[in-house]
Image (cartoon, helix red, strand yellow):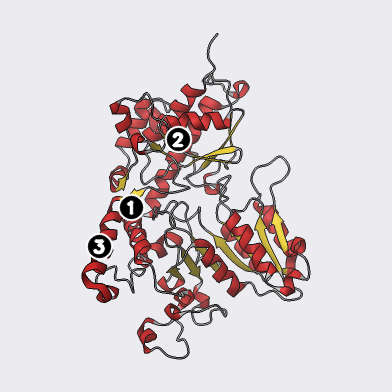
Amino acid sequence: MSSSPGEQLEKIAKANGLQVNSLEFAKYMDAVDPLKEFRKKFDYPKRKTLPIDTKGLGTDELEEECIYMAGNSLGIRPKKAEHYMNLVMDQWKDQALYSHFTGILGAASCDKPGKPFMADVVGAAYEHEITLMNSLTVNLHLMMQAFYRPTETRYKILIEDHAFPSDRYAMRSCIELQPAAMKHGMENALVIVSPRLGEHTIRTEDVIAKIEEAGDSLATVMMPGINYLTGQVFDMNAITAAGHKVGAMVGWDLAHAVGNVSLHLHDWDVDFAVWCTYKYLNSGAGGVGGAFLHHRYVNCPPPHLTGWWGNNDSTRFDMADKIDLAEGCDSFRLANPPPWTACLNYASLEIFHEARMDRILEKQFLLTGFLEYLIKKYFSKTDSNTSGENKSGLTVEIITPSHTKERGSQLSLLFSRGLKEVHEKVEKMGVVCDMRSHIIRVAPTPLYNSFLDVWRFVEIMDKLTQTKKE
């Protein structure tokens, strides 16, 4: 799309005789939303079920659905999750041993039905490029054990400043376990790229400059597709190419990117990637993770830890002395997949397959843009707020990039004052969003959030933060 979300929203509003910041416009956008029926496929939390102070609320208020803007932390439950969990439980109860090999979610193959759907979400060209297994950090360690093989001269790992603790801890431990790297010291082996002074996000040219500066000493680039704190989407294609140009391996942590932004892992020539499924993929807390291994390694993967389930399906029960490696990423599997979490993941992937990522992203463009538009209208600085709507004295800075190619659903909001108080107030009003460090992270998720959700969130925040008149 050539125009900005704000420009498109204003064009739609004008064509219908509405104002973008009106309740009527939010309701209109929901009425014409091609994905509006998908909200019904999820169990939406109500105010009465949240562990928050509900004193003084009437019966009708308690029955209201909350305004859930925290899909970047934990997605809500697909309704079919319960159906598939009961199916797996009943198979175990009724068939015991035979439940390994019966039904669409038989224990021995419960990860397979979702693979083609997941391949579409991450941009894999072949199903053997991905697998569903373990949790994110376990998969990260498995992949790093295979791809990070430091030598006396090539030993550095590049990460970004404020990477999620999983990545930071894992990368430091990978270095600590490698004498060839540790002889240079942690401060030399771990290369950190940071925002420029006074900036919140990291420029692509600065990442590439760090890669080029490290040159032949760089062993692995290991970055997140999206910075969890700022919501910045990194240019994975350009950074992968830059890493390969100096001879480094390139991997990505897609925890906040999968199901949220357009991914083309095969086309970008990414060596490996890992992700969790409990955020935008709505697969439940601790849900089964995923991993990607590029097709070029299909018949020659790097040496890695192996287990029984990394064996070819056709020869697994031959119980041979030496492993007959499964094709592609499946060769990294160590043990049989967990049906309890695989079935939850499948319930969500069915929804993604039906909704299609292209349509999800089209709605995201306008939905996140609507939040951005309203935040700027009501909480921009008074001297630059030509609309005159900011009556609260509170200003909010959006530190997430404004360019839609550099963000997903999340907007990270930096408040001029009273962050904790604001969060507590909106939470009491039934708004679920995430406070981290000095910011509030808000993520209107296209599959189950509405334009009315966004409008109500901003309305609540505006009313609760207005300065009382003398």
In the drawing, what numbered circle is on residue 370?
2
Badge 1 element = helix
Q: Position of residue 266 (x, y in %)?
A: 49, 67
| Residue closest to the eye, 176 or 465 | 176
| Residue closest to the eye, 19 or 38 | 38
Amino acid type, callout 2: Phe
Along the horizontal axis of the image, is 306 left or right of 288? Answer: right
Residue hosting label 1? 355
Residue at 42% in and 78% down: 309
Neighbor class of circle 1 (other Cα within 10 Å; few <14, some 14-19, many 20+) is some
Q: CA distance from mark 3 to mark 2?
A: 40 Å
Along the horizontal axis of the image, is 428 left or right of 81? Answer: right
Q: Earlier in the sequence, mark 3 or mark 2?
A: 3
Residue farthest to the bottom? 321
Q: Position of residue 64 (x, y in %)?
A: 32, 32
174, above or below 226, in the image: below
In the drawing, what numbered circle is on residue 470?
none
| Residue closest to the eye, 96 or 43 | 96
Instruction: Please identify, in this view, whether the residue under mark 3 or under mark 2 is nearer the observer.
Output: 3
Badge 3 element = helix
| Residue closest to the eye, 122 or 39 | 39
Quadrant for residue 272, please give it: bottom right
